[in-house]
Amino acid sequence: MQTLVALIMAGGSGTRFWPLSRPERPKQFLRLVGDRTMLQLTIDRMDGLIPPERILVITNESFVDLVKEQSPEIPEENIIGEPMPRETAAAITLGCAIIEERWPGAVAVVMPSDHTIEPKEDFHRTIISAATAAAQDATLYTFGIKPTFPAEGFGYLESGRELKVLNGVRHFELRSFKEKPDRATAENYLGSGRYFWNSGIFVWKAATILYEIRRNLPEHYFYLVPLAENRQHPAWKWRLRQAFQAVPKISIDYGVMEKAERIAMVEANYKWNDVGGWLALERLLPADHTGNYSLGNLHSLESSDNIIIAEDPNHLVACVGVTGLVVVHTEDATLICKKEDSEKVKQLVQQLSAKK
């Protein structure tokens, strides 16, 4: 099999996890599950498959020092700072151009930094299956997660006929990408058996995705691919900023995957969670006898079905007679909202930012 290289995208702002997540330390740098941050867990997951010298992290330029601090095993030249947010198409174009320049012919594993996946061995098996096929047939592979409930917060993949089974992993035609559905549509997806959650994880030859970017996003190709060379040039950061200003803000799904000539999906048979907002912690944290999920020191009386988070483990949060709330306490801010309104936290943060 060809050389495998990992590209980890760690540039998100994590606004749905306010007030724990802040502009200077968003969720990928927080310890939300266990004693390792989300970024560290993502890097740990590559152990035994891809060595640190072949792991690239692309992040906001203001987070570069945080990445260095949390992942000293990653070579400094493998940490790439984006001058401004431009969605996943720009990050992937730049990252895969660097991969192809440094490791010609390599297969890239592209993943976000805010997922939980276990067991690691099943994740590796799925990667190897997709990478083996991608190296042979120049196809873009995405990972589909078999849904276990009618999730409204995830995008979906519509699968077609089964193409093959490789290394115990099923490969399917990919018919379409679906946006986050309403409840009724999500229930239909679940019942049909044809739809999978869109994990946002990809495997492809770097050269193959660059071909599709050149065909479908020529501005990205023109401005960003040449930057893979001569990153030590004194003007490189200035050129990077100019390039990012010139390209449109678009995701890789919209910009490339929905238009690509050869795309397929592999069925990922491992436990997966996209830690996208506070409600995701219900799938990751243990519950007490009344269904309260908590991090920190919680005492509850006649309270149930709450998510309670305290940044300071010595700070007591006490709840009396409340149900269905999200309560998050930090040193300088406290969030209280109904669980069904937790997606509005992003809107709240936008209002707070506007008021400085």
Image (cartoon, rainbow, N blue to C red):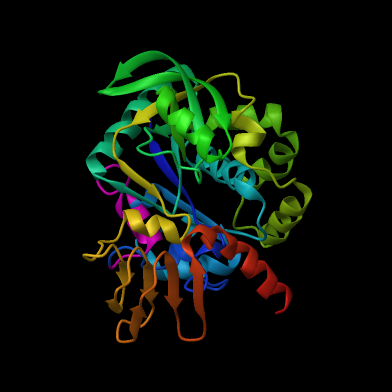
Depth check: give the residue in front, 316 or 256: 316
Residue 322 horizontal/vertical position (percent)? 39, 72
Q: Is residue 238 above or below residue 259?
A: below
Quarter residue 146 falls in: top left
Q: Which quadrant does the C terminus fall into?
A: bottom right
Depth check: give the residue in front, 265 or 187: 187
Residue 151 horizontal/vertical position (percent)? 45, 42
Quarter residue 143 falls in: top left
Magenta includes 24?
A: no
Magenta includes 41?
A: yes
Q: Is residue 242 left or right of residue 193?
A: right
Q: Which quadrant does the N terminus fall into?
A: top left
Q: Residue at x 40, y 13 (%)?
A: 163
Residue 64 horizontal/vertical position (percent)? 52, 66
Residue 153 horizontal/vertical position (percent)? 50, 46
Q: Is residue 5 above or below residue 170?
A: below
Q: Would you say residue 205 is visible in this rendering?
A: no
Depth check: give the residue in front, 159 or 305: 305
Q: Is residue 168 above or below residue 281?
A: above
Give the extent of the magenta segment.
35-51
Q: Residue at x 55, y 30 (%)?
A: 207
Q: Residue at x 55, y 73 (%)?
A: 24
